[in-house]
Image (tube, rainbow, N blue to C red):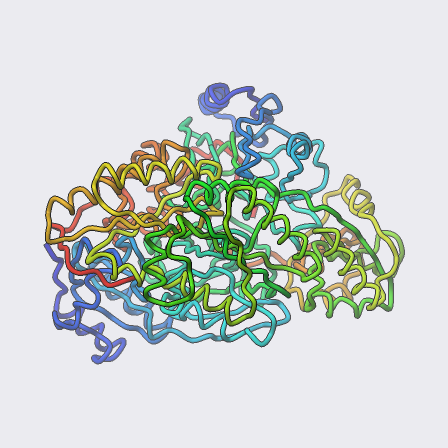
Amino acid sequence: MTAGAPQPLLDSLREIVGAVHVITKPEELLVYECDAYTLEKQLPTAVVLPGGTAEVIAVVKACATHGVPIIPRGAGTSLSGTVLAVTGGIMIALTRMNRILDIDVANRRALVEAGCVNAWVTNAVKGKGLFYAPDPSSQPACTIGGNVGTNSGGPHTLKYGVTTNHILGLELVLPDGEVVWLGTTPDGGEDVDGYDLRGVVIGSEGMFGIVTRVLLRLVRAPQAFKTMLGVFNTVDQASQTVSDIIGAGIVPGALEMMDQLITQAVEAAYKFGFPLDAGAVLIIELDGLAPGLERQAETVVGICRKNGAREVRLAGSDQERADLWKSRKRAFGAIGRLSPNFITQDGVVPRSKLPEMMDFIAECSRKFGLRIPNVFHAGDGNIHPLILYDERDPAQVKRALEASQAILEKCIELGGSVTGEHGIGVEKIDFMARQFSPDDLEAMRLLRRVFDPNGRCNPHKMFPGSKRCGDFAPRKQIAA
Amino acid sequence: MTLTAASVPEVIANLATAAKDGVRITEFALPQMNRVLEYTPEDMTVTVEAGITLAALQQRLAERGQWLPIDPPCPESLSIGALLAGNKSGPRRYGYGTIREHLLGIKVVLSDGRVIKAGGKVVKNVAGYDLCKLFVGSRGTLGVIVEAAFKVLPRPEKEEFVQASGAKLDALRPLTASELAPVVLDLHNQEQDTPTLVVGFAGSREDVDWRLGQARQIGLLEPATLEYEEKFWGEAQEPHRVSVLPSKLLDTLRDLEASFVARAGNGMIYYRGAQAPEKPRLPGELLRRIKDTYDPRHLLPDLPW
């Protein structure tokens, strides 16, 4: 059932942002029916595209007056249905608010609007020896506001940390229309008294209000890189190598694994020169000062060889490094060559349990009769098994969901988490009660009520017992 | 009163007693809850009870060549619970950040006796709201922290400090901008009237040697230690604290006639002998609502801000 929007509300919205920035036609709303988690879909009642914080405030107040749900949305690249309009409501899309407002090189900060695209930030400060560290695969499209919502990660978070480690402060429009700045102010010192409310808003999946502006921390770009491709006959050898590198006290900038199925698909799509017969490859990137990298690289090569690597290739140029990363980050896009549909799973295990987890995934693949390629942030223990299926075969859909569930349950059993960077959204609601106790969940609900007493902001997410969209609506997937 | 307990059930029981007697708890003492519950060096993660001192934890980690990269004053007497509740830090925060960046999970007894946990023990985790952040720096106002899990780092192979005094303060600007990437960037006037700039480097031998060479070229010649820290924090009187935009630090210090230690890279100034800074504007109503939500009977310390 969809909550209808009363005509007076639509009139007010048009007045606030201009009629052209209010979308109500079903065919135009289709874009907003889901994010990159496509198993559940629902049209929002309307989509509003405000042009600035003042408009967001007015829109939020109008919705509050009419008691209509609000759903903040960035680029819609999220992978767990975080921005799904479960029972309709007014979707507030921040994509017009995409400016970089200020870059403060001396203090290594950038102030951006929430709709600013992640990659734009790094591009804007490239010549100044700085970068914005969190680099999700969707970074050419995803927005900073969306990154705040899901506390996004990416390959380079192994060394540099995730979104929460790089946000100093943010402007939040509460669901009643009050606007607050949380954390460090753009011209203020980094320590702020009071609870770390910036910290709790990051990763709250848009349920505490609408983030409108964000103050980012910029990081000094490394002087040098050593980017290596370790080629292994088996996933086991590669997994052990990951454990051994971390165990040796080396913290690479990134440490990524791709198994044979994904390597073949990526190679067919992007022709980087990956070996087609390797059981697994590791992308190992060391960064820092040139003087210290040499010895570290030797140690890493030694660990690879000890674990049976048949080859360790070193990226010979910046171009080669860029190509390698481009291939890795577009890996999901290559899956279309393997299967009409897939589920991008996301889970975390302690890094030393990686070999055991990879064995388990292989076993699931056999047991459920589905191919499950893997491309993931191995150094963090953050797995991304891609469960391939064909939606035209209902039995396959069922088995794909069962395999997903088995893998996530194993993550919990091994002391990990059911999501490392994609979020709970609607997809993983049922796992919350397995990972957390009723009291843990109640403590989270208490916090939500502080920000959103009526539960009107991005409702039906995160918590067990939430309403679900009707039936699954499988359709050919758009690669994330 | 001080809440003293040797176990989680005791924490719960003592909270109930305090509620029954209508006594407000102002401090916590859990020195017997000092176990390392789980330490997996190959995962670079550790879970401890909140009563363990930072020094004891560091000693345990050092046995495996690792450390929790945080260096607040008085680690021998500072419990992990107090470190978290007070969001304590030291000079190396410039290189490694504050404790929120290293905290993976937390277990807390709420004032009604409910035991909750947030986060976990893996290095990436976005399941549920990040309640860990709520308790860092909460000064004990929301619950009793009884356990915490951290990610740890390999100890740097080498760490060296150099300093320069007086006129050479111009060195500060290239230091924040260059590849020198110090882990410590402090200014203090604990040894003489003119400020001393202290710079620390950490990492592999090659890295540190290269950085020391670069530092010499900009006039940072004199070997240094962090002794001024101990001296400053050893005094009985709690210093004032002010946080400014790093680029405004020198101007702020120029107008400050006081005994100070400053984290120049972070824009933090700790000082004694001058007026307290102005109170910053805070989202007071939200803070109050959070306090009232988690501690409706006001059994725990009141908001200090």
| One can see residue B142 in this view | no
Q: Between B48 and A186, which is closer to the camera in this rendering? A: B48
**Residue A323 location in percent, x, y?**
45, 68
Pick the residue in front: A213 or A41: A41
Give the position of the C terminus of chain A as an image quadrant: bottom left
Quadrant in which the N terminus of chain A is drawn: bottom left
Can residue A258 be seen by looking at this rendering? yes
Residue positioned 32% across, 59% down in the render: A265
Q: Where is A138 relative to A260, above or below? A: below
For the image, the number of numbered tags is: 0
| Relative side of A245 to B13, left or right | right
Residue A151 located left or right of residue A66: right
Examine the image and state in which quarter residue B236 appears.
top right
Residue under the point 79% across and 70% down? B170
Within the image, what quadrant is residue A446 found in? Answer: top left
* Residue occupying the point 64% across, 71% down: A106
Q: Is residue B283 above or below residue B146?
A: below
Q: Position of residue A341 (x, y in %)?
A: 20, 56
Q: Is residue A179 left or right of residue A342?
A: right
- Where A187 falls versus A197 (above or below)? below
In which quadrant of the rendered view does residue A127 lie? bottom right
Relative image position of residue A264 (x, y in whole percent): 34, 58
In this rendering, position of residue A243 left or right of residue A267: right
| Place of residue B212 in the rendered image (x, y in percent of width and height, measured from the top left) | 80, 59
